[in-house]
Image (spheres, rainbow, N blue to C red):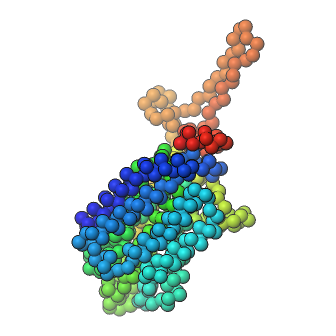
Amino acid sequence: MRDYLLTLCVTAAVTYLLTGPVRKFAIATGAMPEIRARDVHREPTPRLGGIAMFFGLCAGLLVADHLQNLNSVFELSNEPRALLSGAALIWLIGVLDDKFELDALIKLGAQMISAGVMVMQGLTILWLPIPGVGTVALTQWQGTLLTVALVVLTINAVNFVDGLDGLAAGMVCIAAAAFFLYAYRIWFGYTIEAAAPATLFAAILMGMCLGFLPHNMHPARIFMGDSGSMLIGLILAASAISITGQVDPDALKIFEGSTKAATHAALPVFIPLVLPLTIIAIPMADLVLAIVRRTWKGQSPFAADRGHLHHRLLEIGHSHSRAVLIMYFWSALIAFGTLAYSVHSTSMWIVLAVVFLSAVGLVLLLLPRFTPRAPRWAEAVVPPRYRRRRTALVPETPEGLDEPAEERVPVPAGVNGSTAIGNRARFSDRSKAGARG
């Protein structure tokens, strides 16, 4: 565990220290696109944060290769080199997209090629565990297609959710933390060495996100861009593929006894085998809803809009920071709830806790709809959002003036600070936009 924590800290430190210089480089090279109609931020912000995250990945792998307890991962498996090859390719395409705005189909092709590069080097799904049946071996073509599909879905799910400051990095960090605990349990608890690469990937991914988050929290000083979102999506998918398709479920001894008993015993183990899908359940749901919404309107599935889940949270009245925290809450509830159930599937307290926290999440989600208003006598001691709205009176025209004083427009209810997502100023002059960054 100490070696994994050391690798995580080195990755986070390198990512954090490099993000500042990368921000200056992005400003110098003009990687600061003008604000688009679907954007939430108000000022042009540099991208290319994925550069710092990629070098954090390289540093984490380099340190792990020189640690005694983790060196065996590189000696016995080719998966770290496969991950680095696919990550380098998708990162390079992401950097070009952050600078030159590549076509969506080009990026989709690059994602498939990156997945193919990992498959060619051995990072692929070899079998699938099926409850009540056992391990089902996949042919080479079946494993390749399933691997490519999982990589592409995960990358785009993370890319779609990258719409608010700190949202994608935080949600992926939560997902990586839950996955790390599960993979470490498989590796240490069952002494299965095949789970070691997935554990290492999850630890490095946590370090990348933790190192980048201080620069990316609201108000963000730099965005990760596609170079970062596609990179962390690929690493998350690689961790899932490594432990789902490489670890033999028969080694867990869950198919012993009768079929009914084996299926019951396997249930908590099978759930985390699809943990990567549950920990990105919210981004994946956002991806599916976006595709359905756009095709229903006759648009391209790749056409950008303002209908994502985080946009809807802003529209119902949540502030920027609170919308991000709500997304964090639901991601953590799904990921760690699934993880807890896999450890103690017979405990009713886990189910009750998940139900209770889900109710709390719904209350927090609908809080702007039921914002209480404090009485007049208590308005001096409560936050401004709980005070009653007051409409400013129009001052009378002073004597001796021909023109009336400028009328004050009352502030509409439900719009304050970062919750206002109406018309925003656009920078027509790029020199001005660069000066503001």
**Going by the picture, which residue comes out furthest to the top?**
400
Q: Nearer the viewer, residue 272 or 66?
A: 66
In this picture, is 106 found above or below 394?
A: below
Residue under the image location 36 percent in, 85 percent down: 248
Residue under the image location 49 percent in, 32 percent down: 375
Quadrant of the snapshot with the N terminus: bottom left
Residue 147, horizontal then vertical, whole percent: 50, 79
Residue under the image location 40 percent in, 75 percent down: 81
Residue under the image location 73 percent in, 7 percent down: 400
Residue 183, horizontal then vertical, whole percent: 34, 73
Residue 156, horizontal then vertical, whole percent: 55, 66
Residue 126, horizontal then vertical, whole percent: 44, 85
Residue 299 appears anywhere in the view: yes
In this picture, is 226 found above or below 394?
A: below
Q: Nearer the viewer, residue 126 or 273?
A: 126
Residue 349 appears anywhere in the view: no
Residue 414 position by quadrant = top right
In this picture, is 216 found above or below 239?
A: above
Numbered marks: total: 0
Q: Nearer the viewer, residue 364 or 5?
A: 5
